[in-house]
Image (spheres, rainbow, N blue to C red):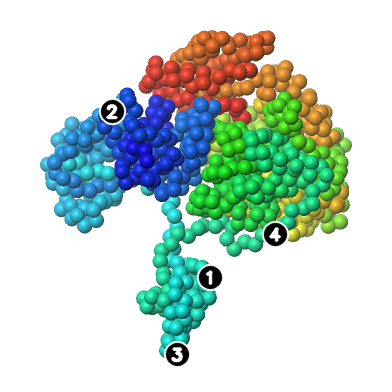
Amino acid sequence: MSRVAGVIVDVPSRSTDRPFSYAVPADMRAWIELGSRVGVPFAGRTLQGFVVSLADEPPAEGPAKLKPIAELLDPLPPLLPDLVELARWISVKYCCTWTAALQAMVPSAIKGKAERHLRLGEAELPDEAAAESGASRTDAGQVDVENPYMASAAFWAMPEEDGQELPDETLPQELVRELRRQGSLKLEAVRERWPEAGGAIKRALAQGVLIEETSIRDRIGVRMQLTVYPPLDREAAQAALEALPGTAKRQKELLQYVLELEGPVTLQAMLADTGANASSAKALAEKGYILIEEAEQQRDPYAGREFRRSAPLPLTDAQREVFVRIRDAVERAAPATFLLHGVTGSGKTEVYMQSIQRALELGREAIVLVPEISLTPQMVERFKGRFGDEVAVLHSRLSSGERYDEWRRIRRGGAKVAIGARSAVFAPFARLGLIVIDEEHESSYKQEETPKYHARDVAVQRARQHGAVVVLGSATPSLETYAAAARDGAGGALLRLSERAVASVLPPVTVTDMREELRSGNRSMFSRALHEALQARLERGEQSVLLLNRRGYSTFVICRSCGYTALCPHCDISLTYHQKTRAMRCHYCGHAELAPRACPSCESEQIRYFGAGTQKVEEELAKLFPGIRVIRMDVDTTTEKNAHEKWLKLFGERKADVLLGTQMVAKGLDFPYVTLVGVIAADTSLNLPDFRAGERTFQLLTQVAGRAGRHHLPGEVIIQTYNPEHDAIIASQKHDYEGFVAEEMKHRRMMGYPPFCRLILVTMSHEQLASLSATSDRFARRLIELAGQRGVLQPLHGSGARALELLGPVASPISRIKDRYRFQCMIKYRGAVPAAELVSEAIRQTEAEAPRSGVLFSVDVDPHMIL
Ligand SMILES: Nc1ncnc2c1ncn2[C@@H]1O[C@H](COP(=O)(O)OP(=O)(O)OP(=O)(O)O)[C@@H](O)[C@H]1O
Ligand SMILES: [Zn+2]
Ligand SMILES: [Zn+2]
């Protein structure tokens, strides 16, 4: 039982990003563990933190007397020791703070908020309080910390005019009475009720007549509900039932009901089931026949849903070969990573499920990551169907309460399989055996906010800690993963499924040249081939999926006379047009304004809005095929909570002929009657200024093509394009992943892009150009110096095994966001270069040289968005 805890306090600043030591009060010693969440005094406030180390003695160089931990926030630590360690690893690899990484691991419900209270103090001023309120020096810390939370004095300074004496007033009697009665009052409430008493309260605080306290409160608590427990002594209750007078009909019915119960039910459910009212229930409880108590209630997002149970399918030979390899690795319980490269419809999911089943049999747990919400309904159904209540689901469309409860079910061992988006990689399992990442190439596995981690790399690290196996599955693996698997692959990290499980053949793909169509007089958005194919599906009662590739699709406002485009006044980027509200909105800062009817620049009425494309396609379909039933899935139709699920269910029941949508219809869907896939415009994503544009387009086309003819009906794919000779289009027509990769690799090698090197993007921002420019120069100099000292500063094209190049500082492609100018440095490196470490160190030195420059650094390791 340790006496001293090292705590990472939730202050998002690099300068305080290290453990501070606190004394563990005797009554907490049995409870505090690595990963415990605590409230600790820090620079005059109580803040939330996580215990990351435990010791018996205070550190030698620290103060003699440590401050004690103020609160222990959960009986069961939300984090496990391996997650604490993993957070540390993330902070180093991704150049972020340890606290940011820890915060990313817990559900938002327990990102506790400090709440301030007032209570009556002993009139005498305790020394400790004096020290705390003035100085920015903390006992726990060994250095001065700049304290962004030192708000207390300012909070009460409001009624005070500049330079004016405080009126000599006393505390409102009513306030004192309330404090006596209730013990403490929320600070916000006091300020609202007695706004004129600010001066008096401030003085009382200074004199110790009043004391301000902070405690951490969770944003979302456990849901408590009145719960009815079946009688402990059934015989007595039975006897009571018989003894009840005939007139007490309601009570008799109720007692009969509870006697038949097998476990507790909510009071609400009991009343609904029996039609009784609350007072009859209360009468029974008062007589001691039943127990009614507040009890914790799980919020189950899938409550009341039936999932059709599925049994493991007999595997095909190819599946079996792959499965055996994974199963053996799971049984060895040594860390391993496999890339499962399996064409669309090859039965990867069945392999995942049987591998997971093996892990569960061995008493271990599994995580399944899926790229995004649109994919989860079918996956959840398949996994719940196979593993029932053992499955917990974590994704962003759940309410925070539901997420919290699913997460706690995992933490307490109530679920053995977690399925969810990116952050489910942190599911708090203690005996992890397998992590599956489906569609591993998807860019949604990269988090775009700090900590900017990639779930794939985190999964590999986590597997290392647990002796677990990672399976990365995809029909179109990312070039990085493919290159890595081919490189380490002597032992065969690459597993293949080259044929479909049921249909066995991939559907033929036709590419239609839209320039040709226009030349021959077809001005519709459908080529003749796609038109005919749709017609044929309608006649045969089969279904079609239509993809409108919306990546980079213009939704901005442009004047056709003068070329004016509407830009955000705070960011150098065009505003996006939203048809529904006729508003133009900035995706970066949220600025919104009404779209103009005439051009603000030349007053021409030739101003055009390029709105959501899917709606236009839907209208055109209705015109060309009267009576056609279309389900449109895009951001506008899927904002509701279970919208995806609802639409996919309707489509699965064949209540629509066409599923039309953006990226979200491209992946993962498995519907036997879909025999046609049409891509309206393949090109929109080809011309983005991003070195992965070709790769992304190829992946998208291959994925969507894979939705056709997955079962017994043969399928067909039609891709419409203005660039029929582009590598990505040709390769997807031929289902030629290897061919595409070979071409693309040549290109990447020539241009010096991943996987031939790695990238770190450092973005700096400030309101003033001059400060920004000075700081970014300083940063670049520091980095060059550090790299020089390590002997790695060499051109990437040179012959050295290790090389690092710095490009910049230059203005970022989006040179201003939210009124802050932005500069960037791109670091390219290859070989064993500790680049992240050098970057972190260069930032530390730059910040130390000019601690108040106000320049914000943002680091993106292995960036996905170069813009
Ligand atoms: N061994 C098997 N026997 C019979 N049917 C199978 C078998 N394996 C898979 N299937 C079926 O084949 C279809 C395609 O499988 P699945 O969806 O798992 O493929 P996938 O590789 O995950 O595809 P995608 O990458 O396109 O999402 C599913 O309907 C699945 O039920
Ligand atoms: Zn104009
Ligand atoms: Zn903006």
**Does the beta carbon at disc 3 come under 8 Å from ligand 1?**
no
Discs 3/1, front: 1
- Tell us which disc is closer to us: 2 or 3: 2
Please name the amino acid that badge 4 sits on: Arg
| Mark positioned earlier in the residue sequence (3 or 4) | 3
Amino acid on which disc 1 is placed: Glu
Q: Please give the name of the residue rendered at 17% of the width and 41% of the height, measured from the top-left corner.
A: 208
Q: Residue furthest left?
A: 168
Callout 4–callout 2 Cβ contact below 8 Å: no
- Residue 77, quarter of the rendered image: top left
Which of 539 and 73 lies nearest the eye of the viewer?
73
Q: CA distance from mark 2 to mark 3?
A: 75 Å
Residue type pointed to by label 3: Gly
Q: To which residue does mark 3 refer? A: 246
In the image, is 229 to the left or to the right of 435? left
Q: Which residue is mark 4?
A: 309
Position of 537 with respect to 660 (left or right) is: right
Residue 228 visible to an observer of this rendering: yes
Q: Which residue position is annotated with label 2?
A: 63
Q: Quadrant of residue 664?
A: top right
The N terminus: image quadrant:
top left
**Secondary element at image label 1:** loop
Q: What residue lies at 38% left-to-right and 20% top-to-bottom?
A: 851
The residue drawn where x is 53% and y is 31% is 90
Q: Which mark is first along the chain, 1 or 3?
A: 3
